[in-house]
Amino acid sequence: MVHSNKSKYPPGGYGRFFLGAVAVFAAAALFWMTFSSGPAPRSFSVEVAEPELSSLAAAGKVLYEANCAICHGIRASGTDTGPPLVHDIYNPGHHADLAFFSAAKFGVRQHHWRYGNMPPQPQASEHQVKAIVRYVRELQIANGIRYKPHRM
Ligand code: HEC
């Protein structure tokens, strides 16, 4: 019998094995960049449908448009100066209503995105922010953003 050493090596030799490993690594890196919680692309906006609003949310909409839409976009869909609030990141399990009151009162230091800091919006009273939160939550619910427990 003629001895062959063919079966000792993977088909195509180690070069191909190496390329395969590189491809797996690249796919893992891409997955990590897409799904890790690091800063997302600087600017993007989402499609948002507006449901029929409660009366509190309807009042909130007017206040939202006067105070927040310039950065967070119409229907909280995002602009190039602020993130969409109709986004999984802002589901009530990750950003409770308190985050909205605090954002308006004290501003927000850049941490989820690369838009820079959110300046305080002291002209929006707590009473007004309450209505704004209702509006954003009703948009979230209508667009499939549900409460998820925060794990981080
Ligand atoms: C001048 C632009 C600007 C305006 C006006 C603005 N925001 Fe923001 N807001 C931002 C930016 C930018 C961020 C994202 C900061 C980050 O996470 O990197 C943000 C983040 C937030 C967050 C997330 C807070 C957190 O804890 O991560 C909430 C809630 C919010 N804004 C609500 C509001 C509300 C309500 C108004 C209106 C009263 C408003 N914003 C007006 C720019 C703005």
Image (cartoon, helix red, strand yellow):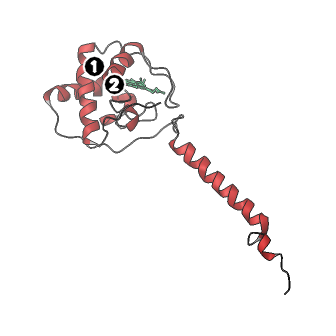
Judge left or right: residue 55 versus residue 109. left
Give the residue drawn at x 34%, y 33%. 91
Residue matched to label 2: 96
Q: Secondary structure at mark 2?
A: loop
Three-letter amino acid code of the residue under disc 2 = Ala
Three-letter amino acid code of the residue under disc 1 = Val
**63 or 7: nearer the eye?**
7
The quarter in which the N terminus is drawn is bottom right
Q: Quadrant of residue 32?
A: top right
Q: Quadrant of residue 125?
A: top left
Q: Secondary structure at mark 1?
A: helix
Mark 1 Cα shell of 10 Å, populated few (<14), some (14-19), many (≥20): many
**Residues tagged 2 and 1 counted as in contact (Cβ below 8 A):** no
How many numbered badges does the structure rendering display?
A: 2
Residue 23's x, y, as percent? 66, 57
Note whether ligand 1 is within 8 Å of mark 2.
Answer: no
Tell which quarter ligand 1 is in: top left
Location of residue 42 with respect to 24 vertically, above or below: above
CA separation, marks 2 and 1?
13 Å
Residue 104's x, y, as percent? 36, 17
Give the residue drawn at x 26%, y 44%. 49
Of all residues, the one furthest to the bottom in this rendering is 1
Judge left or right: residue 41 versus residue 104. right
**47 or 143: nearer the eye?**
143
Q: Earlier along the polypeptide chain: callout 2 or callout 1?
A: 2
Note whether ligand 1 is within 8 Å of mark 1.
Answer: yes
Mark 2 Cα shell of 10 Å, populated few (<14), some (14-19), many (≥20): few
Residue 129, label in figure:
1
- Is any part of residue 49 visible from this angle? yes
Give the residue drawn at x 51%, y 37%. 40
